[in-house]
Image (tube, rainbow, N blue to C red):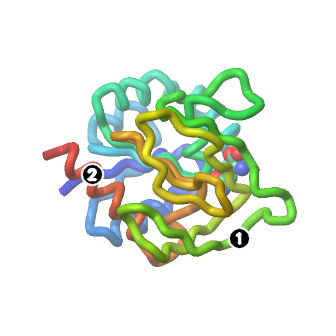
């Protein structure tokens, strides 16, 4: 069985654990760098990217996570986690992990739409996936190696670049676990 880590510093950690377990995989909440050796893939959850970054610095996660990626291990960033993975963030000089070749914009769906749900067609996942968006970022542009998986109102909201998967919405907050399953399949394929 593959072991999927969920970065457990801040945000929707338990919800991802529940979704991973619903898919029949083992979930490990990652609170210490040493735990990274136990897992085959990592989910960086939604929450608040600036707070998460502060805790990543405090607990020394930045370099070890870059190394984890360097080993080819799959990583999935959802919402704030997507911002953490991105190479560029609109309005900021420096990225966080800077691993996935995308530019993201934070809180980009406007104040009046702080949170909403939308039905999405996600390539390789589902034609009718309910995406829960909470102060969500969107992907402004992608590099040549990045596959756009879903758009909403002409904005990119899910993408994949080889070992990296990212989405603007929270795929762990409903009982539809197909997006989580898609990531688990990426992890299985990498492990084989
Ligand atoms: N639901 C979320 O993860 C929101 C992301 C948050 N707006 C941020 O910029 O980090």
Q: Residue furthest right?
A: 112
Q: Is residue 188 left or right of residue 157?
A: left
Residue at 50 percent of width and 26 percent of height: 62
> Which residue in the rendered view is the most extreme toward the left?
192
On screen, residue 79 versus residue 150, left or right, reads: right
Would you say 129 lies left or right of 5 here?
Answer: right
Badge 1 or badge 2: first in the primary sequence: 2
Q: Residue at 57% x, 74% y: name it.
A: 119
> In what element is the residue under mark 1?
strand
The quarter in which the N terminus is drawn is: bottom left
Query: In the rendered image, which residue does mark 1 sit on?
Result: 116
- Considering depth in this image, is 189 or 126 the residue closer to the camera? 126
What is the quadrant of residue 67 in the picture? Answer: top left
Residue shown at the point (29%, 43%) measured from the top left: 39
Which image quadrant for residue 55? top right
Cα separation, mark 1 vs mark 2, equals 31 Å
* Residue displayed at 37% across by 31% down: 69
Dot 1 alpha-carbon crowd within 10 angstroms: few under 14, some 14 to 19, many 20 or more: some
Q: Residues within 10 Å of mark 2 (few under 14, many from 20)?
A: some
- Disc 1 or disc 2, which is closer to the eye? 1
Give the residue at mark 2: 3
Q: Which mark is residue 144?
A: none
Q: Eyeballing the image, is 77 above or below 64? A: below
Q: Nearer the viewer, residue 69 or 119?
A: 119
Is residue 102 depicted above or below 58 in this figure? below
Question: Which is nearer the eye, 18 or 148?
Answer: 148
| Image coordinates for residue 153, horizontal then vertical, percent | 68, 62
Instruction: State the image coordinates of residue 165 (x, y, percent, origin top left).
Output: 43, 47
The kind of secondary structure element at disc 2 is: strand
Q: Point out residue 156 in the picture as x, y percentages from the top left corner.
A: 59, 52
């Amino acid at each position: 069985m593959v072991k999927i880590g969920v970065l457990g510093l801040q945000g929707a950690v338990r919800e991802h654990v529940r979704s991973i377990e619903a898919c029949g995989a083992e979930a490990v909440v990652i609170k210490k760098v040493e735990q990274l050796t136990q897992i085959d893939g990592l989910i960086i959850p939604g929450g608040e990217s600036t707070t998460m970054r502060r805790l990543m610095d405090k607990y020394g996660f930045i370099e070890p996570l870059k190394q984890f990626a360097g080993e080819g291990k799959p990583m999935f960033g959802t919402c704030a986690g997507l911002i953490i993975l991105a190479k560029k963030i609109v309005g900021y000089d420096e990225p966080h992990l800077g691993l996935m070749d995308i530019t993201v914009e934070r809180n980009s769906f406007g104040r009046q739409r702080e949170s909403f749900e939308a039905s999405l067609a996600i390539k390789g996942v589902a034609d009718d996936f309910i995406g829960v968006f909470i102060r969500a970022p969107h992907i402004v542009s992608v590099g040549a190696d990045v596959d756009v998986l879903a758009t909403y109102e002409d904005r990119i909201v899910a993408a994949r670049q080889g070992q990296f998967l990212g989405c603007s919405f929270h795929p762990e907050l409903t009982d539809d676990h197909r997006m989580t399953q898609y990531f688990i399949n990426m992890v299985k394929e990498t492990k084989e």
